[in-house]
Amino acid sequence: MKAVVLVAHADDETLGAGGTIAKLVETGWGVEVVILSDGLLTVRGVQQDNRADAVAACQCLGVAGPRFMGFPDQKFDTVPMADLAGAVGALSLQPDLVITHVDTDLNMDHRLTCEVAKIVSRPKVKPCSLLGCEVPNTTFWNGQPFAANYYVDITDYLDTKIEAFVRYRNECQPFPHPWSKDGLRLLARYHGMQAGFDAAEAFFVIRGYEARLP
């Protein structure tokens, strides 16, 4: 079975699904991370390059370095949807599962990435499940609750997720920022409490098929 984690920016894969990625790898899935942006962003006039940190984070999760599709960070709305979806479609990945963003996210790049995922995961060749992940802050700061209806037990993978996110030297923040070690642990424990696990990642099932979900 093959999973593709299709996200907008370097760090989204770890924030939204790091524990699930590590679990999928350990249970025999092939996992590939595809990042629509170029891995570069400008913060208060200073450019940050997260590409090397993304490679380190992915290695920590047990997967190869991500594919960067090269679109400009926070400017996906300047690119035709046909170009965004066409670039990913040209990879001919044919996954059984795609993990992506949800279309209620505050971040425009995230919402557009969700649309790309819906397009490239259409079951033309074979069934493909589609899960929307929760990215702390941009998902729950949009005035809409995250509509979690699927939970993955990451009790044995939470430390790995946090270890991977620490690789993002520009992004890991002190608590109470959601992008902190304590913030990620607290959110995982909260979702675990909802689902009856010690720690969990929450998802929204956009489309699901038997045996094609984690």
Image (cartoon, rainbow, N blue to C red):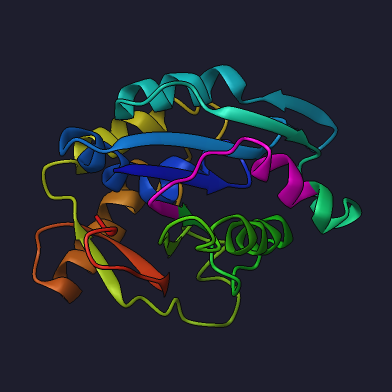
The residue under the point 18% across, 50% down is 154
Q: Residue 55: where, in percent of width, then height?
A: 49, 20
Magenta stretch: residue 93 in it?
A: yes
125 w.r.t. 92: above or below = below
Q: Is residue 210 left or right of residue 120?
A: left
Given residues 25 and 135, the one toward you in this image is 25
Residue 51 percent coordinates (x, y): 60, 22
Residue at 56% across, 71% down:
141
Closer-to-camera residue (98/107): 98
Q: Quadrant of the C terminus?
A: bottom left
Tell me if residue 153 can be seen. yes
* Residue 206 forms part of the magenta stretch: no
Please indicate whether residue 2 sits to the left or right of residue 170 in the image. left
Q: Position of residue 164 (x, y in %)?
A: 35, 30
Which residue reaches farthest front? 125
The spot of residue 62 in percent (x, y) is 30, 25
Residue 99, above or below 18: below
Question: In the displayed structure, would residue 70 be above or below residue 123?
Answer: above
Residue sitting at x 54%, y 67%: 102
Q: Is residue 176 visible?
A: no
Region in magenta: 84-98
Q: How many marks?
A: 0
Query: Looking at the rendering, in which quadrant would you find the N terminus?
Result: top left
